[in-house]
Image (cartoon, rainbow, N blue to C red):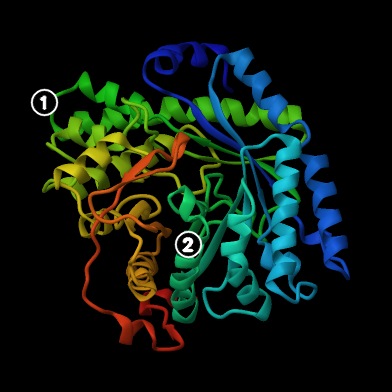
Amino acid sequence: MININEVIETNKMILEENLDVRTITMGISLLDCKADTVEKVCDKIYAKITDRAKNLVSVGQEIEKEYGIPIVNKRISVTPIALVGGGVCETTKDFVKIAKTLDKAAKEVGVNLIGGYSALVSKAMTPADKLLIESIPEALASTDRVCSSVNVGSTKTGINMDAVRLIGEIILQTAELTKEQDSLGCIKFVVFCNAPDDNPFMAGAFLGVTEGDTVINVGVSGPGVVKKALESVRGADFEVLCETIKKTAFKVTRVGQLVAQEASKRLGYPFGIIDLSLAPTPAVGDSIAEILEEIGLEYAGAPGTTAALAMLNDQVKKGGIMASSYVGGLSGAFIPVSEDQRMIDAVQAGALTLEKLEAMTCVCSVGLDMIAVPGDTKATTLSGIIADEMAIGMINQKTTAVRIIPVIGKTVGDVAEFGGLFGTAPVMPVNQFSCDAFINRTGRIPAPVHSFKN
């Protein structure tokens, strides 16, 4: 049972250490919105979202005021739209109509982002899946709040390399269509391996088919809280270090649990999960890289970074699972470059490279996140980077993802400006050697041998 004393205990964290609840995300199933025309599908989608989420923002604001807990975002995730539009959408334009309906509904209820313009294609693509993927550039360029994701691999099925090849081209098209805003459309698109059904964080949130009709999922954060706690044990041994991280993660997660329970009760929909990911922001003091530096690294990317990140991620999970019976989503440490000022500093200092980031993704949540690369990067190179990250997820039975932004008109040394929580990103160099012949093979990479556990 959570009581107000636990919240009072965290007041200092909120006031001085950037603790916040990063998002309340309402998951809404759209499986019952199928119809015999695209127009009817859109009408049903708009009606259901605006009905279920009509009080989401106001309830979030009430909880903020009552408990003094900042809730940064109120968001919606929906059933993968390829499943909803399949059988009725005959062109990419049909899917874009649905994207615009999602955007309209999101604006009506006041949420800042809506996720689920998605397809699940880890083994193969249906015609509807392929159409949705091909529609992504126009959908993201013509909407403000819609986020898109595609799951192209899993430990059970392998990696759909046909989808990986296509997505490299889609990312470049999206970048080109939004080049006037530093290719902003690409920050709203994520490609996954082993995507979870209950992730509340954007841009990869969607409501999986294993979920109920409507559910409340909450994502907490608190890199600044962890860093501050570690300052008090500077120079201590690893046991003390780990215990400190665990205890702090417990307290942060309890705050999220309180918010989740209150939101569920007031909105009248069941509580799903707490995602206890450490998600940074561009604000000073709200950084994963600063935690790594406090642990003992000169910069993120220095030798020892992967080991330090592995320890951090594990202790966060150990502390979090004691604070809530329903931990899910991604739950760990995010390492987005553009959203973490000290990560940006590490890149600009030469301490952090794309290859080192890839190694770090073996032990953290998600993967290569908010990476800006030169706008003239080839589609096959983007696909190769995606394939490498998908392989890490497939082999290690974990979720991995890529959110990469080829910034049209910019090159290494330039800076892309995205604004708000998305921050700024230094354009990073990519390996110039070709992987064309590899990417242009057709078919899929088979599942690894350890996937056969039945």
Could you tell me if the residues under marks 2 and 1 are in contact, i.e. CB atoms within 8 Å? no
Q: Identify the disc placed on residue 363.
A: none
Asked if residue 411 is positioned above or below residue 278 in the image, the reply reads: below
The span from disc 2 to disc 1 (Cα, nearest Å) is: 49 Å
Q: Which residue is mark 1?
A: 235
Give the structural element (helix, strand or loop) at label 1. Answer: loop
Asked if residue 160 is positioned above or below residue 402 in the image, the reply reads: below
Q: Position of residue 423 (x, y in %)?
A: 40, 38
The residue closer to the viewer here, 415 or 261, is 415
Q: Amino acid at mark 1?
A: Gly
- Please tell me which residue is depicted at 21% across the width and 18% down the height of the picture: 232
Question: Quick check: can you spot residue 155?
Answer: no
Side (left or right) of 145 relative to 34: left
Give the quadrant of residue 81: bottom right
Side (left or right) of 97 relative to 443: right
Give the structural element (helix, strand or loop) at label 2. Answer: helix
Q: Which residue is mark 2?
A: 176
Question: Quick check: can you spot residue 371?
Answer: yes
Q: Earlier in the sequence, mark 2 or mark 1?
A: 2
- Please tell me which residue is depicted at 76% across the width and 38% down the height of the picture: 108
Q: Position of residue 445 (x, y in %)?
A: 40, 82
The residue closer to the viewer here, 313 or 360, is 360
